[in-house]
Image (cartoon, rainbow, N blue to C red):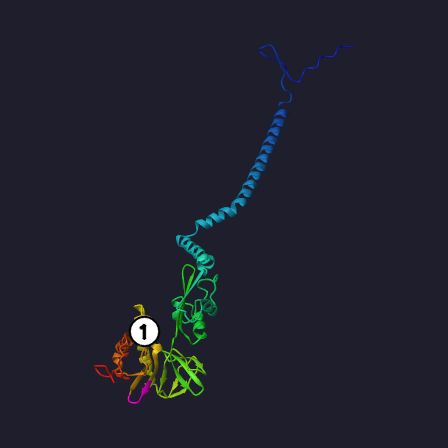
Amino acid sequence: MPDKEPRKPDEEITVVEDGMYDSPDVSDESSNEDGKDVKKAEETSRSESGEKGSSEKKEKADKGKTAVMPGSGFGKFIRGISIKGWLLIIVLLMILICAMLFLFHRNFRVQEIHVVGNNRFTQEEILAISGVKEGDHLYSHVGGSLKEIARLQYGKARQKIISYDPYIADAKVYPHYPGEVYIEVTERRKVAYVAMPDGYAIISEDSVVLEIVTGDVPQGIPEIRGLPIRSAQIGKKLDLTSSDGYDICITVLGAILGSDANAQQDGDEFNFLSHVICVRYCENMTTFIDLDIPGVDHIISVKIGSLQTISDQMTWLRYAVVSGYFADKPGTVLDMTGSKYILR
C-alpha cells in the first residue's frame, strides 16, 4: 500500500535569520479581532469605571455642597448687612445692656433713706407714711404731676405724707443716684389759738387749724381775739366772715416768730412768742399785743403801728423785753404807732 503523502501545512514555514523557526500565527485575524474585543471591553470598562468615579465624585461634591450650604448662607447673610444695619444692631445691644443694668444693678435699688425737717414726727413714722422701703427700685415711686415726673420726684409718696396730718405743711421726696432717697418735710408750727363755743382751735401761721382742744387753755402760744369766726375744721383754714383783722394778727405773729428765729441764729434761746398773752384786733385797724414779761408784775400792752415796719418793731420789742427795759418802769401801755416809742 503506497505511503500516504505527507500533509502539507496550510502555511509555509518561514526561516528566520537567527535560525529559529517562526510559525505564522494562524489565528492573527481572530486574535486581532479578539484583541479589538478585549480593547473595546477594556475601554468600556474604563469608561464605565470613569463614569462611576465621576458620578461618585459628583455625589461627594454634591454632599459637600449640601453640608456647607447653611454656613455659606449665614456668611453670605453677614456679608450682606450694611454699615447702617451694623450700627442699628450695636445700638440695640447697647440699649439692651443699659436696660438690664437699669433693672438689676444694685445702684438702682434704694439703699439709704434720709429724712430731714421732721420734729414732731419720727423718721420711722415718715417712712411708714411714705411707703418707700429699702430694696425698692430707685425710680419705681416716680409719679404725680407732670412737673414731678419731669423732676423724677415721688409725687404719690409726697401726697401721702402731706395728707397724713395737718401739722405737715409740705414735703419733697426724690431719689438721688446711687441708691439714696431724700424726704424733706416742712412742718407747721402752732402760733396761736382762737376761742370756740366748744373749746379752742389751735392754728398755724398759714391759718390752718391744727387741733381743736377742750378744757384748759393751750399754753405757750397767744390767743387771737376780736375775730368774726364762723367755724373751725381740722386741716382747713378758719372760716371767717371777714379776714381783714385776721391777716393783721397773723402778720404780727409772723414778725414775732421772725425775731425769735433771727436771735436764735446768734445763740439767743429766749422764746419771745411764749410771753405773748394775746393779739387783739380792734376797730379802725388797730392791733394790741399783751405781754407777760419776766420780772414785771403787770401786763404790758403794746399798740402796733404801721405794718410796713412790723419786723423792725418786733425786733426792738424783743430786745427791750430781754434787756429788762420794762423792769423799773410803771407804765402799762407802750405806743409804737409814732416815730418814737412812748410808755404810758
**Residue 77 image point, x, y percent:** 46, 50
Image coordinates for residue 174, horizontal then vertical, percent: 41, 66
Front one among 97 and 274? 274
- In the figure, residue 262 lies in which quadrant? bottom left
| Secondary element at image label 1 | helix
Q: Residues within 10 Å of mark 1 (few under 14, many from 20)?
A: many
Residue furthest to the bottom in view is 283
* Residue 53 relative to residue 212: left or right: right
Q: Quadrant of residue 155?
A: bottom left
Residue 123 at x, y = what percent?
44, 67
Residue drawn at (25%, 80%) of the image: 308
Q: Nearer the viewer, residue 53 or 70?
A: 70
Residue, far right: 1
Could you tell me the amino acid type at mark 1? Asp
The answer to whether residue 82 is above or below residue 57 is below
Q: Which residues are magenta?
A: 280-284
The quadrant in which residue 158 appears is bottom left
In the rendered structure, the answer to whether residue 144 lies left or right of residue 59 reads: left
Residue placed under numbered mark 1 in the picture = 260
Give the main secondary structure of the magenta stretch: strand
| In the image, residue 7 lies in the stretch drawn in magenta | no
Q: Quadrant of the C terminus?
A: bottom left
Residue 165, horizontal then vertical, whole percent:
44, 75
